């Protein structure tokens, strides 16, 4: 048995996290690998956490809180990057909804079958996991590889719809006895996000937002950043109070901001905060929280993880029936936020079987690797098409 970790949250801990998180960009540098930055950061967390060297204590309350802040901020940034004001995206929404709905059919079959195979009562959870997509993973991959075109807009719509649906459905699936209370909480948080959109639209129309922007830029007050963070934290507080995942709070607020329009200066500030510090901290913390040794103690959970990951890939490539290219179907299967929230909720409420949390994350990692490879293939196909397309006269 390994000794209990005795490390508290200190500058030493932050230094360790900041240094090992550099593994993310280092692994992402070779373009032929097409690995997302967060994959290396997760791996770094595994190396210094419960599975590896145990240099970071993921149970430290301060570190856990900072990780939650990072998660909320990342979900907000992901939502704000959805091109809500793009008319082409709105026209692609119907196709995206149809594909997300189609994925649900094999997800139900596979989720129920996997639960029956392992004799668990978690079929609803497995269905949500298999059907989910992750905007926080897919959108950065699409942007970093400069993928574009109508198929990518349809993919964005599909991922956004699936992500929102899974965020709302997850608490209901993992804890059915509290489904009514959780559904009410999700409705309240969604209504708050809609109200914020209406307020932001009004401020945009009457010129208040522009006035604040100019004042902030001239006086170096960073007012927009302060106001956005204050609103995000208020939304997260509402979500926690209503027993709803902060995923919904962050992502729905991000969508509201995207629908109104996010100033470039604010986007750069949020990018620096999220991708420079709190995002890497979250992924390292997540990796450190995983005890993959549980899979050794419960080897049947390795099979569960493989089936969940493989099932997600299989369910999403069914969209080939609706005309989606195979690499984009695989890319849409990328999942992260929903599995993380499932493990967090399940662990805190003691709802998961021993080793089941590690199996859920193993399945998610399978989709991350597969989606990275699929994104690289889609980028190569786009580059070849560009080379063969004759230049306009």
Image (tube, rainbow, N blue to C red):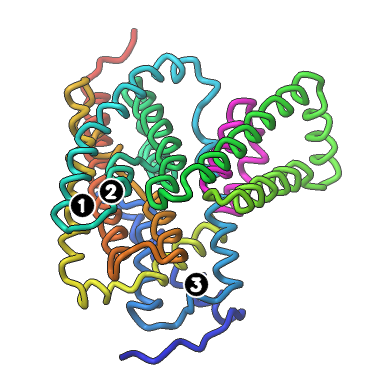
Is 188 placed left or right of 91 in the picture? Answer: right
Q: Earlier in the sequence, mark 2 or mark 3?
A: 3
Marks 1/2 in contact by CB < 8 Å: the verdict is yes
Observer-nearest residue: 157 or 354? 354
Toward which corner of the image does residue 101 lie, by quadrant? top left
Q: Which residue is rendered at x = 76% and y = 19% of the image?
A: 205
Magenta segment, which residues? 246-274
- Residue 126, labelled with which disc? 2
Is residue 140 depicted above or below 156 in this figure? below
Residue 177, position in %: x, y? 44, 50
Q: Position of residue 61 (x, y in %)?
A: 58, 73
Q: Residue at x 70, y 48 (%)?
A: 234
Q: Residue 17: which disc?
A: 3
Identify the element where label 1 is drawn. helix
Which residue shows up at 70% across the image and 25% down it? 198
Most distant residue in the front direction: 177
Mark 1, residue position: 115
The quadrant where residue 40 appears: bottom left
């Amino acid at each position: 048995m390994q000794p209990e970790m005795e490390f508290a949250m200190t500058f030493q801990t932050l230094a360790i996290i900041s240094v090992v998180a550099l593994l993310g960009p280092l692994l992402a540098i070779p373009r032929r690998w097409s690995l997302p930055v967060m994959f290396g950061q997760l791996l770094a967390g595994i190396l210094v956490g419960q599975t590896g060297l145990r240099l970071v204590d993921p149970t430290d309350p301060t570190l856990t809180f900072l990780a939650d802040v990072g998660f909320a901020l990342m979900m907000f940034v992901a939502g704000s990057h959805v091109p809500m004001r793009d008319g082409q995206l709105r026209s692609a929404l119907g196709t995206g909804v149809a594909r997300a709905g189609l994925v649900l059919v094999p997800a139900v079959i596979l989720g129920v079958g996997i639960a029956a195979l392992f004799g668990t009562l978690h079929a609803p959870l497995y269905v949500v996991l298999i059907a989910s997509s992750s905007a926080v993973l897919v959108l950065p991959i699409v942007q970093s590889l400069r993928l574009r075109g109508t198929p990518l807009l349809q993919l964005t719509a599909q991922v956004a719809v699936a992500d929102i649906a899974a965020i709302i459905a997850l608490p209901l699936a993992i804890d059915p006895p509290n489904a009514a209370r959780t559904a009410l909480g999700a409705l309240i948080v969604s209504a708050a996000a809609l109200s914020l959109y209406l307020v932001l639209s009004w401020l945009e129309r009457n010129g208040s937002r522009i006035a604040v922007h100019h004042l902030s830029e001239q006086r170096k007050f960073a007012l927009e950043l302060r106001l956005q963070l204050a609103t995000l934290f208020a939304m997260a507080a509402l979500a926690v109070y209503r027993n709803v995942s902060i995923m919904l709070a962050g992502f729905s607020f991000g969508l509201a901001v995207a629908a109104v329009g996010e100033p470039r200066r604010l986007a750069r500030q949020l990018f620096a905060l999220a991708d420079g510090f709190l995002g890497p901290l979250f992924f390292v913390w997540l990796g450190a929280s995983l005890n993959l040794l549980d899979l050794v103690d419960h080897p049947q959970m390795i099979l569960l993880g493989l089936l969940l990951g493989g099932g997600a890939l299989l369910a999403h490539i069914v969209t080939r029936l609706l005309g989606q290219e195979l690499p984009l179907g695989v890319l849409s299967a990328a999942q992260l936020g929903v599995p993380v929230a499932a493990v967090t909720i399940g662990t805190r409420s003691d709802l998961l079987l021993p080793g089941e949390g590690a199996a859920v994350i193993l399945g998610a990692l399978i989709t991350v690797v597969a989606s990275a490879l699929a994104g690289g293939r889609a980028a190569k196909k786009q580059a070849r098409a560009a080379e063969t397309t004759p230049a306009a006269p």
